[in-house]
């Protein structure tokens, strides 16, 4: 990776990945794009930045050519709850953006990364230690997009030789940019509310397990996979990755260790609860470990210490 074009660079993953990659590969070599350009944003100020709507295929091609990109990291997408509220828009952005980005990668011979998700699984998938290769019949538009995306990336590899790579991320937790419109977002909100008000009302029900990962581990996973020896990658576009699996009571108990008066209660949102119940409880990451050395540093305990400390530093 020498010249990297990133879409959705102001989003939850992009805003941190761009800064990390600028540190590794040089600021000028990471071209950040997003649909808007807030002048005071660190991503806009710290290196090249261009406005790009990912449904505009021509502009994406022009920008990748202009900067002589050799790698595309395609992150622009709607998350699960937003996609459920606006399914057609989700199809157009998530699939339209992806196929545009793959076409650019094909034409300009770029390496390619896009994230899949635990959302690519559905109610008929084995729920515990979900295997790498298993039943994928998701019941959400987001999941339909993610399975289609995995297959499309495989297709561009087999048919056109595009060096496509990807992981199935679990819920990502970070203190930098809040996520928007996801089902796993409660596990981010809970830390903010713990510090702000000492209590949190969860829209996900007690006892609902989902996989999660702290952002520093997610960023390392992207970079490690992109730098991995391609001859070792059997599951190019859909590696299961995970760091922890918990339910709301368990994250609340962990927060209580630091804020003893913290309280959780519940006001379950049927839409997001339904999505959560259709996803695995915990997934198996053996293929990622074996094929490119996937590893994580943070479990729930370590993540909670860091999240609370970093949010406090931010003045939350
Ligand atoms: N975090 C995402 C969501 O909840 C899952 O990929 O939509």
Image: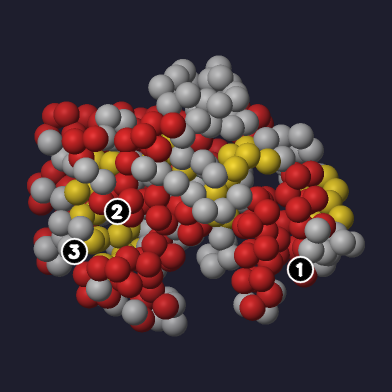
Assess disc 1: are there few (<14), some (14-19) or many (≥20) residues with their C-alpha within 10 Å of its C-alpha.
some
Q: Residue at x 32, y 35 (%)?
A: 291
Viewer-nearest residue: 135 or 40: 135
State the residue position of label 2: 73
Assess disc 3: are there few (<14), some (14-19) or many (≥20) residues with their C-alpha within 10 Å of its C-alpha.
many
Q: Quadrant of the N terminus?
A: bottom left
Q: Which mark is residue 3?
A: 3
Q: In the visual, does 161 lie left or right of 71?
A: left
Q: Quadrant of the C terminus?
A: bottom right
**Circle 1 — which element?**
helix
Which comes before the other along the chain, label 1 or label 3? 3
Q: Residue at x 43, y 65 (%)?
A: 16
* Corner quadrant of residue 208: top right
State the residue position of label 1: 195
**Image location of residue 53, percent across then percent down:** 32, 58
Mark 1 C-beta closer than 8 Å to ligand 1: no
């Amino acid at each position: 990776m020498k010249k990297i074009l990133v879409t959705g660079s102001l989003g939850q993953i992009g805003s941190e990945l761009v800064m990390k990659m600028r540190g590794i590969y040089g600021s000028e070599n990471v071209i950040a794009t997003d649909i808007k350009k807030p002048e005071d944003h660190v991503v806009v100020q710290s290196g090249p930045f261009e406005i790009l709507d990912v449904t505009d295929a021509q502009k994406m091609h022009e920008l990748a050519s202009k900067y002589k990109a050799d790698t595309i990291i395609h992150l622009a997408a709607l998350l699960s709850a937003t996609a459920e509220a606006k399914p057609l828009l989700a199809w157009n952005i998530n699939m339209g953006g992806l196929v545009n980005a793959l076409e650019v990668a094909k034409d300009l011979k770029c390496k390619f990364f896009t994230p899949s998700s635990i959302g690519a699984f559905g109610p008929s998938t084995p729920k515990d230690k979900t295997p790498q290769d298993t039943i994928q019949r998701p019941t959400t538009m987001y999941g339909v997009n993610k399975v289609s995306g995995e297959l499309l990336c495989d297709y561009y590899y087999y048919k056109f030789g595009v060096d496509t790579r990807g992981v199935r991320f679990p819920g990502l937790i970070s203190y930098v940019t809040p996520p928007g419109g996801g089902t796993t977002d409660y596990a981010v909100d809970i830390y903010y509310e713990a510090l702000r008000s000492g209590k949190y009302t969860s829209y996900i029900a007690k006892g609902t397990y989902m996989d999660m990962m702290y952002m520093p581990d997610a960023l390392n996973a992207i970079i490690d996979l992109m730098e991995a020896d391609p001859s070792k990658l059997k599951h190019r576009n859909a590696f299961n990755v995970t760091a922890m699996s918990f339910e709301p009571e368990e994250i609340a108990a962990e927060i209580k260790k630091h804020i003893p008066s913290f309280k959780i209660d519940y006001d379950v949102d049927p839409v997001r609860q339904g999505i959560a119940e259709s996803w695995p409880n915990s997934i198996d990451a053996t293929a990622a470990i074996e094929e490119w050395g996937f590893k994580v540093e943070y479990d729930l305990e370590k993540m909670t210490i860091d999240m609370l400390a970093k949010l406090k530093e931010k003045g939350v």
